[in-house]
Image (cartoon, rainbow, N blue to C red):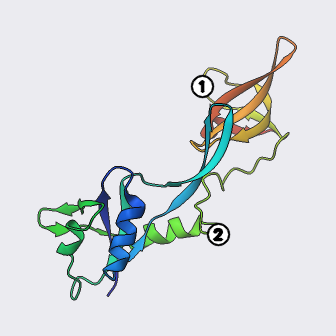
Amino acid sequence: MLKWFVANTRARSEARARLNLERQGFDVYLPQYLKIRRHARRTDTVPTPLFPRYLFVGMDMEVARWRAVNSTIGVSQLVANGNEPVCVPEQIIQSIHAREDADGWVLMNKYLPYRKGDKVHINGGPLTDQVGLFDCVDDRERVFILLDLLGRAVKVRVDAEQLGALA
């Protein structure tokens, strides 16, 4: 029976580990999202692992040679409790799959019901009880809103949990 396990990879070697594990016949799941990267006045969208330095390996412990995972190029080791690899509950894998779009990218901000220009209310933090306009979301699940301060629209970053819809 196929179960999922977590493999710790070497730094920035998730794709290499995935390729080498797949070549050995293992099922591999490396959830990724599209990260917005800004550098030198350029903005790029790059695929980024959802869990840096980790990926999921699917195998049947009765038949699989799971110790081979630890010696795979790109892999540091399977996450284990003593000598036994730790199994990941199937619900976790399913919940990550449920957040993927049609192209297989994990949607980071799927649960936010706001569109650009919607009025929002700040429910916590230093700007509690302020009202602003929803602007955008970054890849760290921080929300940018526009507040009217001293007659100017000022872009402010707040946690998504601090927002509430304005009726």
Choose between 120 and 129: the one closer to the eye: 120
Where residue 121 sits, quadrant-wise, is top right
Image x and y of residue 116, in percent: 82, 42
Depth check, front residue: 123 or 48: 48
The residue that disc 1 covers is 125
Residue 94 location in percent, x, y? 49, 72
**Front disc: 2 or 1:** 2
**Residue 69 appears left or right of 84:** right
Number of numbered discs visible in the structure rendering? 2
Give the percent coordinates (x, y) of residue 143: 67, 37
Amino acid at pointer 1: Gly
Q: Quadrant of the N terminus?
A: bottom left
Q: Relative to 101, is 15 on the left or the right?
A: left
Image quarter hosting the C terminus: top right
Task: State which quadrant residue 80 falls in.
Answer: bottom left
The residue that disc 2 covers is 103
Q: Amino acid at mark 2?
A: Asp
- Compared with 45, 37 (above or below) is above
